[in-house]
Every structure is written in C-alpha cells, then in structure tokens.
Amino acid sequence: MYYQKEIETMPVEALKDLQSRKLVRQVNHVYENVAYYRDKMDKAGVRPSDIKSVEDLRRLPFLEKEDLRNTYPSGMLAVPIKDCVRIHSTSGTTGKRVIAYYTQHDLDLWEDCVARALSAAGATVDDTVQICFGYGLFTGGMGFHGASQKLGCVTLPMSSGNTERQIQFMQDLGSTVLCCTPSYAGYLADTLTVSGLTPDDIPLKIGIFGAEPWTEEMRASIEKRLGIKAFDIYGLTEISGPGVAFECEEQNGMHINEDHFIAEIINPITGEVLPEGEKGELVLTSIDKEAFPMMRYRTHDICVLKRGKCSCGRSFIKMAKPMGRSDDMMIIRGVNVFPSQIESVLLKEGYSNNYLIEIDRVNSTDTFDVFVEFLPEDFDDTIKTVTAREKRLQSELKKMVGISPAVHLRPPMSLARSDGKAVRINDKRKLL
C-alpha cells in the first residue's frame, strides 16, 4: 500500500531530476542563511553556482555531529526563529545536545515520510496505532503521532513504560499497530509471557520498530512472540527523525525517501564516495528542510545502498539494515567488535534481546563481559545448567567475534531497562 503512490513509484530519471532541482535550491538557501556552512564551503573553494545537479554533491564539504555541537544551540538555523514551530533534541549522552528546529513545512514533510512507512507496513484508516516511543524532545513519539493521524488511524499516544497498562490497552482498545524501539517490543513480549498470555490474546498485527540497532534474529523472535509482522524504520534527529527510510512488504532493506533526502555511501576513513552496492558509511543530505537543513551529514552508520526492482513497486533506493557504526565500534584486545554481532548470537541461541556488554581494563588487559537474560519460558537457575549454558554461549560468541567474553546469565527481566534507546555498552576503560 502507498501513502503518496505517484511520488513513491516515480521513475528513477524523473526522481534524479527532482533531486537536482531541489539540491540547487537548497545549497543556495544554506549558503545565504547559515554562516557556519558558508565558511566551510568557502574554505573548500565551492560556490553555490558550482552545484548544478546531484552529480556535483560530492564537491560539498561534510557535516559532522561535532559541527552541530560547535554551533549549539542555533548556529545551523537557516530561517528566523520566529518561523519555527517546534524543537527536538538528541539525548546528549556523549556531549552537548543537538538541537533540531522545524518549520510547519518541515513537520508536514516529516509526517508524510512516516505516513509512507505506516502505509508500506499495511496500516490503514481501520487500524489503531499504539505509540510507545517516548514523547518530548525525542523525535520518536511525535513523528509517529502526526503521521498516524494524517493516515486517519486511531492514535494512542502511550509513550514508553507502564508495560502492564500497555498490554491492557492493547486488549481493551484493540491496538493493531505497535510503534516503539525493538528492545521495548521484546520487553512487551517478555511481559506477555510472564502474564500467562499468548499472541492470540492481543489484536496486534503490525510492528514498526526503530531508534536502535536490531538483528534479523531479533525480528524473528519478536514476530513469533507477539504474533505480528515487524518492520524496520530509520531516521535521526539531525535529519528529521524516524521516516528517513522504511521497510516495505519485502522486509529486505529500507526505501529512502529520495524526494526529500539524497543518500551517499563513503569510505569512512578517506571520505571517498563508493559505488552502489559497496559497504561504507551513510551520508545524508536533506533537500527540502527549511529550518535545519543538513548538507552531506555523516551518520556514521555502516550500510549498503542498492537500487533495483522491488515487488512493492517503489522506485526509491534501499539501504540495508545498518551493520554497525564507524564511530562506536568497540575495539577489544585489538579486535573490532560490533554489538549487532553479539546480539545475533544471543538471539540465535535462544536468549533475551535485553543484554549488556561491559568492557574494562585491568592490569593493562581488556576485560570483556556479556550479561544476558534467560527468556521467561526457558529459565533454569540450577548451577549445573547455568554453567553449561554460559560455557556454550561463550564458545559461540568467540566464533563470531574472534575473542572470548565472560558470559553471565541472569533471570528474566532482571537487567535494567531504558525508557528510550536501550543502553547496550558500558565501557569503563580510561582510553584517553
């Protein structure tokens, strides 16, 4: 199903022409109104007149999160503050918050993007959408809220937490679409099991999950335990929020909303633009945003872009599920380790999607511990069983990442939960 079929199925050549026209206009808008980026362009020897089509995009300088912190709070704002109607923000857990501004035009486009995602997953005016993303400065709740209403769905702004009430409302109000982080979907599934309920006891049929990495193994687990079809959605506050890209019925890569965003893949070390199909770092340019337009923003998400015929009929290029990040990859005892590798093994071996990776340095040697919960239906706390399963899991993790962690199995629902993005890594090393 489509929300804006004519755009979503636009021929590729027409789409490229549209992108080129919008890019030329956007470069002029940014150059004239954002002094910080104008200075970057001047230092790079690039003038707006040099940008004539999408082929010239690579001439523009990159933007990094550090640039946004350096210009906090409004140094990247491209319109007068009186023209803005909303502000969102990142969590700020690794430094100053990134403040993103929106005009009403920006909000309308953002909601259109998320409405496309809801439609692609099968949501219609007959559905009730339960939104368990956090509301407030985080973009998740508000992005889905406006889109759900635009699509004509009954919208439940539940936010996160109070899981028992979430399940009660699913049953009492007939929620058919669930929107939240994948880790919270897993927690809902755990709570359902502990409560003695099965997927047949709730009316859910669709889940749209994002804001944190998740694996195919986690998708299969959530689909089975909630009795739904689970779809991925991608976005980031700096670009707009959820809805930059979304999965269709194929569940095989996310279509990027190319009428609003231009995607590139670069070598994360050299910055060289890579050919389609090669793995590298995703770079995004927003070509429609008025208030906070990002030019060649380095997401640090590692993925692959691929264009081809899709059974859903959409012509938008697809991005693969992010395979890790170029900036939060863990280097443990000289080995590159991504949390997604750990999660893949845990779920394959039948454990919860709630886990914690803890790294420290003792006597100049890295320690590597993985804490993970049993699933409620699989819990066995006898010492012999726990020891044997920890040993097996340790072996499987070593096969995947090349080094052996210390594995600690914990009872169901015993590790801390987060109301927002799940905290997966606790790196205690003093590396500076």
Image (tube, grey):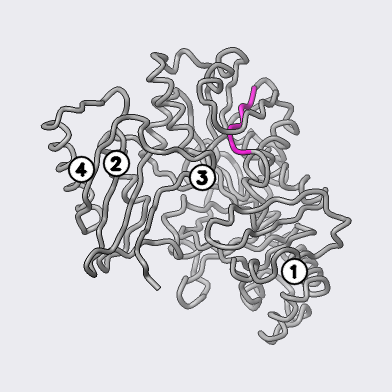
Circle 3 residue: 421
- For the residues labelled 1 and 4, the Cα–Cα distance comes to 49 Å
Q: Earlier in the sequence, mark 1 or mark 2?
A: 1
The part of the chain drawn in magenta is: 128-134
Observer able to see residue 356: yes
Question: Distance from label 2 to label 4 (Cα)?
Answer: 8 Å
Under tag 4, what secondary structure? helix
Nearer-N-terminus badge (2/4)? 2
Residue 215 in percent (x, y) is at 40, 44
Element type where label 3 sits in the image: loop
Left or right: residue 411 versus residue 152 is left
Q: Position of residue 26 (x, y in %)?
A: 77, 66
Tag in front: 1 or 2: 1
Image-based side of 240 in relation to 352, left or right: right
| Spatial separation of the CA atoms under disc 3 and disc 4 | 25 Å
Question: Which residue shows up at 66% across the image and 57% down it?
Answer: 261
Q: Secondary structure at mark 2?
A: helix
* Residue type for callout 2: Leu
Tag 2 residue: 346
